[in-house]
Image (cartoon, rainbow, N blue to C red):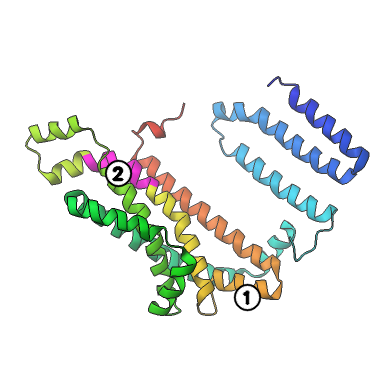
Amino acid sequence: MPPWTLPALGAALIALAMLTDARLALILAVWFGAWALNAVLANRVAVSGLRLIVPLIFGVTLLVLWELSVRLYDISFVILPAPSAIWARMVTETDILWADFRQTILKGALAGYILGCGGAFLAALAVDRSGFLQRGLLPVGNFIAALPIVGTAPIFVMWFGFGWQSKSAVVVAMVFFPMLVNCVQGLKASDAMQRDLMQTYAASYGQTLMKLRLPSALPFIFNGLKICTTLALIGAIVAEFFGSPTVGMGFRIKIEMGRLAMDMVWAEIAVAALAGSGFYGLVALVERRLTFWHPSQRRG
């Protein structure tokens, strides 16, 4: 694309919008201005190493456009509150948000994530050693993974009660089989020639596993761990819609929706999104440290 194309297109659309709606022209001006800034920075940050600048500007731009759209077009608070109103609620309701975060994320989601992913890894080792389990367990796992959470969550709540334990059980059911499939595929990632070489050296199964197969499986394992971070949060929050104590993100969203307190609902969503992004980023950071040798971690 020629460098003059974007400014020319933006100027034409802004001029056209000014003839019909000045508010739309302002929104377009902000959008194309941020777009042009990111286009300039995109090539330079790759050299300077400041890779967070472009996504940060993009995120801030979306928030500004959201705020402008709500304010300029006087959108109903019930339909969509402005980011400033959501932020104000996050500041004033810190205690409630922290209690919900601790109940849903630190208890329900994190406990289920550790149990589900850890159990899936151990099951993958068993499946790797047993052809019977490989042919029998994986198809059943794919069937169970396809079950809708809105159908299984009420059952787990009835079995394990209204506390965080039932939410952890839902998370375990959601993350177990995706993690299992990734681990099983990862254990098969090493080349046949590499495994034959280990046999030539008279290496035992444990030695081959630790020195060859697990290092080769690490990218697959971390891929499963990253997928399960989002699944764990979704499972814990949705499970709270079907029964929980008077605390928790899912419980709060359900209650505040009934009160039409949409700023509080969006505040809970924002906290969940930040927690999910941080959790995902932490797993990705550990992956980068442990799989620095893999081609996927090499930056061009």
Q: Earlier in the sequence, mark 1 or mark 2?
A: 2
As shown in the figure, which amino acid type bears the numbered disc 1?
A: Ile
Q: Quadrant of residue 192?
A: top left
Residue found at the far right of this picture = 19
- Residue displayed at 58% across by 68% down: 97
Q: Is residue 2 visible?
A: yes
Q: Is residue 238 left or right of residue 142?
A: right
Q: Is residue 107 visible?
A: no
Q: Residue 36 location in percent, x, y?
A: 72, 31
Work out how far the residue at label 1 is from the one at label 2, CA to CA, in angstroms.
Answer: 42 Å
Mark 2, residue position: 185
- Residue displayed at 13% across by 32% down: 196
Which range is magenta?
A: 213-223
- Mark 1 lies on a secondary structure that is helix
Q: Is residue 221 left or right of residue 261?
A: left
As shown in the figure, which amino acid type bears the numbered disc 2?
A: Gln
Question: Is the N terminus in the top left, top right, bottom left or bottom right quadrant?
Answer: top right
* 46 versus 93 height, above or below: above
Give the number of the disc on residue 26: none
In the image, 143 versus 200, the foreground residue is 143
In the image, 174 versus 283, the foreground residue is 174
- Mark 2 lies on a secondary structure that is helix
| Label 1 vs label 2, nearer the camera | 2
Q: Residue 252 location in percent, x, y?
A: 59, 72
Q: Quadrant of residue 22?
A: top right
Give the number of the disc on residue 255: 1
